[in-house]
Amino acid sequence: MTTPPTDDLWQAKKQAIREQARKNRVSVKNKEELSRQLCDKVMAMREYRAAGTVMWYVDAGSEVRTRGSLPDALAGEKRIVIPYCIVETNELALFHLEDMAELVEGAYKILEPASDIREMEGKTVRPEELDLVLVPGTAFDDRGGRMGQGKGYYDRLLSRVRPDAPLIGLAFDCQMFPEIPVAPHDVFMDQVVTESETFIGRGRK
Protein backbone atom coordinates (compact mmCIF):
# COMPACT_ATOMS: atom_id res chain seq x y z
CA MET A 1 0.00 0.00 0.00
CA THR A 2 1.37 3.42 -0.92
CA THR A 3 2.27 5.63 2.02
CA PRO A 4 0.17 8.81 2.17
CA PRO A 5 1.87 11.85 0.62
CA THR A 6 1.76 13.75 3.95
CA ASP A 7 3.99 11.21 5.68
CA ASP A 8 7.52 12.49 6.40
CA LEU A 9 9.10 9.14 5.48
CA TRP A 10 7.26 9.16 2.14
CA GLN A 11 8.55 12.65 1.36
CA ALA A 12 12.08 11.75 2.42
CA LYS A 13 12.08 8.65 0.22
CA LYS A 14 10.84 10.65 -2.74
CA GLN A 15 13.51 13.31 -2.26
CA ALA A 16 16.25 10.69 -1.94
CA ILE A 17 15.18 9.01 -5.19
CA ARG A 18 14.99 12.35 -7.00
CA GLU A 19 18.51 13.31 -5.88
CA GLN A 20 19.98 9.91 -6.79
CA ALA A 21 18.24 9.87 -10.15
CA ARG A 22 19.59 13.31 -11.02
CA LYS A 23 23.13 12.22 -10.11
CA ASN A 24 22.71 9.06 -12.19
CA ARG A 25 21.43 11.00 -15.18
CA VAL A 26 24.17 13.62 -15.03
CA SER A 27 26.82 10.88 -14.91
CA VAL A 28 25.74 9.34 -18.23
CA LYS A 29 28.70 9.94 -20.55
CA ASN A 30 27.31 9.25 -24.02
CA LYS A 31 23.95 11.04 -23.74
CA GLU A 32 23.78 12.08 -27.38
CA GLU A 33 24.36 8.59 -28.75
CA LEU A 34 22.06 6.85 -26.26
CA SER A 35 19.37 9.49 -26.76
CA ARG A 36 19.44 9.03 -30.51
CA GLN A 37 19.15 5.26 -30.11
CA LEU A 38 16.27 5.74 -27.70
CA CYS A 39 14.39 8.17 -29.94
CA ASP A 40 14.91 5.94 -32.99
CA LYS A 41 13.47 3.08 -30.96
CA VAL A 42 10.38 5.13 -30.10
CA MET A 43 9.86 6.31 -33.68
CA ALA A 44 9.89 2.68 -34.84
CA MET A 45 7.16 1.67 -32.38
CA ARG A 46 3.76 0.68 -33.70
CA GLU A 47 2.08 3.24 -31.44
CA TYR A 48 4.22 6.05 -32.80
CA ARG A 49 3.68 5.07 -36.43
CA ALA A 50 -0.09 4.99 -35.87
CA ALA A 51 -0.25 8.45 -34.28
CA GLY A 52 -1.12 11.54 -36.30
CA THR A 53 -0.34 14.19 -33.66
CA VAL A 54 2.64 13.51 -31.41
CA MET A 55 3.84 15.55 -28.47
CA TRP A 56 7.61 15.62 -28.11
CA TYR A 57 9.48 17.69 -25.55
CA VAL A 58 12.59 19.81 -26.00
CA ASP A 59 15.26 18.42 -23.69
CA ALA A 60 16.69 20.49 -20.84
CA GLY A 61 19.58 19.78 -18.51
CA SER A 62 20.50 16.10 -18.43
CA GLU A 63 17.19 14.76 -19.80
CA VAL A 64 17.12 12.28 -22.65
CA ARG A 65 18.08 14.43 -25.62
CA THR A 66 15.38 15.05 -28.21
CA ARG A 67 16.88 17.95 -30.17
CA GLY A 68 18.89 15.64 -32.42
CA SER A 69 15.79 13.65 -33.39
CA LEU A 70 13.20 16.44 -33.64
CA PRO A 71 14.32 17.48 -37.15
CA ASP A 72 13.68 13.92 -38.37
CA ALA A 73 10.27 13.95 -36.69
CA LEU A 74 9.47 17.29 -38.32
CA ALA A 75 10.48 15.94 -41.73
CA GLY A 76 7.80 13.26 -41.48
CA GLU A 77 4.07 13.54 -42.03
CA LYS A 78 3.03 13.81 -38.39
CA ARG A 79 1.90 16.95 -36.64
CA ILE A 80 4.62 17.58 -34.05
CA VAL A 81 3.65 19.36 -30.86
CA ILE A 82 5.83 20.58 -27.99
CA PRO A 83 4.91 21.93 -24.55
CA TYR A 84 6.07 25.24 -23.17
CA CYS A 85 5.75 26.78 -19.74
CA ILE A 86 3.40 29.62 -18.89
CA VAL A 87 5.20 30.97 -15.83
CA GLU A 88 2.31 33.11 -14.60
CA THR A 89 -0.03 30.12 -14.22
CA ASN A 90 2.46 27.28 -13.71
CA GLU A 91 0.87 25.44 -16.63
CA LEU A 92 2.14 23.85 -19.81
CA ALA A 93 0.63 25.02 -23.10
CA LEU A 94 1.00 23.22 -26.43
CA PHE A 95 2.47 24.51 -29.68
CA HIS A 96 2.44 23.05 -33.20
CA LEU A 97 6.13 23.00 -34.13
CA GLU A 98 6.98 23.13 -37.82
CA ASP A 99 10.59 24.32 -37.78
CA MET A 100 13.34 24.31 -35.14
CA ALA A 101 13.92 27.98 -36.01
CA GLU A 102 10.62 28.75 -34.23
CA LEU A 103 12.31 28.03 -30.89
CA VAL A 104 14.08 30.54 -28.66
CA GLU A 105 15.51 30.27 -25.13
CA GLY A 106 12.80 30.94 -22.59
CA ALA A 107 11.85 30.06 -19.00
CA TYR A 108 14.44 28.00 -17.11
CA LYS A 109 16.73 28.34 -20.20
CA ILE A 110 14.58 25.83 -22.08
CA LEU A 111 13.99 26.23 -25.80
CA GLU A 112 10.37 27.21 -26.39
CA PRO A 113 8.25 28.85 -29.09
CA ALA A 114 8.91 32.53 -29.67
CA SER A 115 6.23 34.55 -27.88
CA ASP A 116 5.09 36.39 -31.02
CA ILE A 117 4.04 33.20 -32.84
CA ARG A 118 2.44 31.17 -30.05
CA GLU A 119 -1.09 32.39 -30.73
CA MET A 120 -0.91 32.36 -34.51
CA GLU A 121 -3.58 30.44 -36.37
CA GLY A 122 -2.87 26.71 -36.39
CA LYS A 123 -0.22 26.93 -33.67
CA THR A 124 -2.25 26.34 -30.51
CA VAL A 125 -3.10 22.72 -29.68
CA ARG A 126 -5.42 21.24 -27.06
CA PRO A 127 -4.27 18.22 -24.99
CA GLU A 128 -7.28 16.29 -26.30
CA GLU A 129 -5.84 16.46 -29.83
CA LEU A 130 -2.72 14.47 -28.94
CA ASP A 131 -2.51 10.88 -30.21
CA LEU A 132 0.75 10.03 -28.41
CA VAL A 133 2.82 11.83 -25.79
CA LEU A 134 6.56 11.54 -25.10
CA VAL A 135 7.28 12.44 -21.49
CA PRO A 136 10.54 13.35 -19.75
CA GLY A 137 11.15 12.55 -16.11
CA THR A 138 13.68 12.43 -13.33
CA ALA A 139 12.95 8.82 -12.33
CA PHE A 140 10.60 6.00 -13.35
CA ASP A 141 9.70 2.47 -12.27
CA ASP A 142 8.54 -0.54 -14.26
CA ARG A 143 4.87 0.12 -13.37
CA GLY A 144 5.09 3.39 -15.27
CA GLY A 145 5.41 5.43 -12.09
CA ARG A 146 7.06 8.75 -12.83
CA MET A 147 8.84 11.40 -10.80
CA GLY A 148 9.28 14.83 -12.35
CA GLN A 149 10.83 18.03 -11.05
CA GLY A 150 8.27 18.32 -8.29
CA LYS A 151 6.25 21.21 -9.73
CA GLY A 152 3.43 19.11 -11.21
CA TYR A 153 3.52 20.69 -14.68
CA TYR A 154 3.32 17.42 -16.58
CA ASP A 155 0.80 15.76 -14.26
CA ARG A 156 -1.64 18.62 -14.83
CA LEU A 157 -1.15 18.45 -18.59
CA LEU A 158 -1.30 14.65 -18.84
CA SER A 159 -4.52 14.47 -16.85
CA ARG A 160 -6.21 16.18 -19.82
CA VAL A 161 -4.87 13.84 -22.52
CA ARG A 162 -7.31 11.34 -24.03
CA PRO A 163 -7.22 7.91 -22.32
CA ASP A 164 -6.50 6.20 -25.65
CA ALA A 165 -3.41 8.34 -26.35
CA PRO A 166 -0.34 6.43 -25.08
CA LEU A 167 1.93 8.18 -22.60
CA ILE A 168 5.53 7.09 -23.17
CA GLY A 169 8.24 8.02 -20.71
CA LEU A 170 11.79 8.44 -22.03
CA ALA A 171 14.63 7.58 -19.66
CA PHE A 172 18.15 6.28 -19.46
CA ASP A 173 18.56 2.90 -17.77
CA CYS A 174 20.04 4.62 -14.72
CA GLN A 175 16.76 6.49 -14.11
CA MET A 176 14.82 3.29 -13.41
CA PHE A 177 14.07 2.49 -9.75
CA PRO A 178 12.30 -0.48 -8.10
CA GLU A 179 9.36 1.70 -7.01
CA ILE A 180 8.54 5.39 -7.30
CA PRO A 181 6.45 6.82 -4.42
CA VAL A 182 3.29 8.16 -6.05
CA ALA A 183 0.48 10.44 -4.93
CA PRO A 184 -3.16 10.31 -6.11
CA HIS A 185 -2.57 13.10 -8.66
CA ASP A 186 0.49 11.42 -10.21
CA VAL A 187 -0.07 10.09 -13.73
CA PHE A 188 1.34 6.68 -14.68
CA MET A 189 2.97 6.04 -18.04
CA ASP A 190 1.64 3.43 -20.46
CA GLN A 191 5.23 2.59 -21.37
CA VAL A 192 8.72 3.61 -20.29
CA VAL A 193 11.42 3.29 -22.95
CA THR A 194 15.12 3.16 -22.09
CA GLU A 195 18.13 2.36 -24.26
CA SER A 196 17.97 -1.31 -23.33
CA GLU A 197 14.35 -2.07 -22.36
CA THR A 198 10.72 -1.15 -22.88
CA PHE A 199 8.56 -1.40 -19.76
CA ILE A 200 4.79 -1.78 -20.02
CA GLY A 201 3.30 0.48 -17.35
CA ARG A 202 -0.10 0.43 -15.74
CA GLY A 203 -1.22 3.59 -17.53
CA ARG A 204 -4.18 5.67 -16.35
CA LYS A 205 -6.18 2.97 -14.58
Image (cartoon, grey):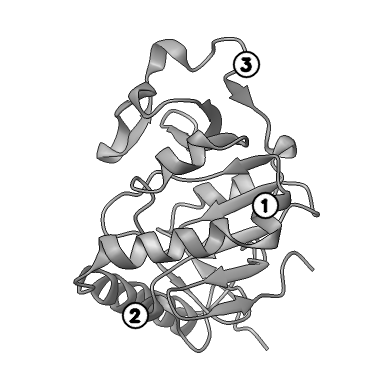
Q: Does residue 129 sit above or below 51 in this rendering?
A: above
Residue underneath mark 1: 49
What amino acid type is highlighted by mark number 3?
A: Gly
Viewer-side residue, 146 vs 131? 131
Q: Which quadrant holds the N terminus?
A: bottom right
What is the quadrant of residue 70 in the picture?
A: top left
Residue in view at x 64 percent, y 58 percent: 167
In what element is the residue under mark 3? loop
Q: Earlier in the sequence, mark 2 or mark 3?
A: 2
Q: Amino acid at mark 1?
A: Arg
Q: Find residue 87 and report its horizontal and vertical position in percent.
A: 41, 31
Residue pictured at 56% horizontal, 71% vertical:
192
- Other residues around mark 1 within 10 Å, as few (<14) / some (14–19) / many (≥20): few
Above or below, 156 relative to 37: above
Query: Quick check: marks 2 and 3 in contact, CB under 8 Å?
Result: no
Marks 1 and 2 close (CB-CB < 8 Å) = no
Question: In the rendered image, which quarter contains the C terminus?
Answer: bottom right
The numbered disc on residue 16 is 2
Amino acid under label 2?
A: Ala
Query: Viewed as shown, does residue 164 lie left or right of 130?
Result: right
